[in-house]
Image: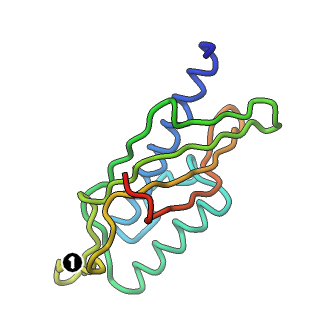
Amino acid sequence: MSADEAQARKAVIAAYQSMADEQAKAYAKSSLAGSDITKYATGKALRDVKDAVFVNMQNGIVVKGEPKVIAAEDDVTLDTTSKPQRASLQVCFDTNTWKPVDKKTGKSVAPPNQVKRYTITANLQQQRSRWLVTDEKADKEKTC
């Protein structure tokens, strides 16, 4: 692996982690205010976050804590020949420390028997020298 490819793989992982961090900020308040989600997500990925924030706001739900994103450089597949450059990333998404609660009562509203660790495949593309998550798909059958 070349140094450029290694750096690109690290940048892809960092972009996904940053998106997850901004997503956690937005979910914690059920608001996009103060979140930089648009710096790390676009397209369907951004719409999905906005939709979830809206639904949580309507239902009085906030999400406490932060998810853990576990990924390594080997989990990144790069397509540097496409314009814009594209990448896919497989992450282990751990929600054991990220809990939806009723904003007024503080009681958990997590569905019973919900899978807490599962695999997500995210697609990213490079825009203006920055990687953005374009979409992601959770596979809750594939635990990690």
Q: Is residue 97 above or below residue 29?
A: above
Question: Could you tell me which residue is drawn at 42 percent across and 69 percent down?
Answer: 31
101 or 71, nearer to the observer = 71
Question: Could you tell me which residue is drawn at 56 percent across and 61 percent down?
Answer: 137
Q: Which residue is mark 1?
A: 108
116 or 41, nearer to the observer = 116
The reply, left or right, for residue 76 in relation to residue 116 is: right
Image color mode: rainbow
Quadrant where the N terminus is found in the figure: top right
Return the x and y of residue 93 as percentages of the image width and height. Answer: 39, 53
* Mark 1 surroundings within 10 Å by alpha-carbon count, few (fewer than 14), some (14 through 19), many (20 or more): some
Q: Residue furthest bottom?
A: 59
Return the x and y of residue 37 as percentages of the image width and height. Answer: 51, 54
Amino acid under label 1? Answer: Ser
Residue 23 position by quadrant: bottom left
The reply, left or right, for residue 99 in relation to residue 57 is: left
Return the x and y of residue 75 as percentages of the image width and height. Answer: 52, 37
71 or 101, nearer to the observer = 71
Question: Could you tell me which residue is drawn at 56 percent across and 47 percent down?
Answer: 40
Element type where label 1 sits in the image: loop
Q: Is residue 51 above or below residue 134?
A: below
Q: Residue furthest top?
A: 3
Q: Is residue 20 above or below residue 75?
A: below
Return the x and y of residue 116 as percentages of the image width and height. Answer: 31, 63
Residue 141 position by quadrant: bottom left
Question: Could you tell me which residue is drawn at 65 percent across and 63 percent down?
Answer: 44
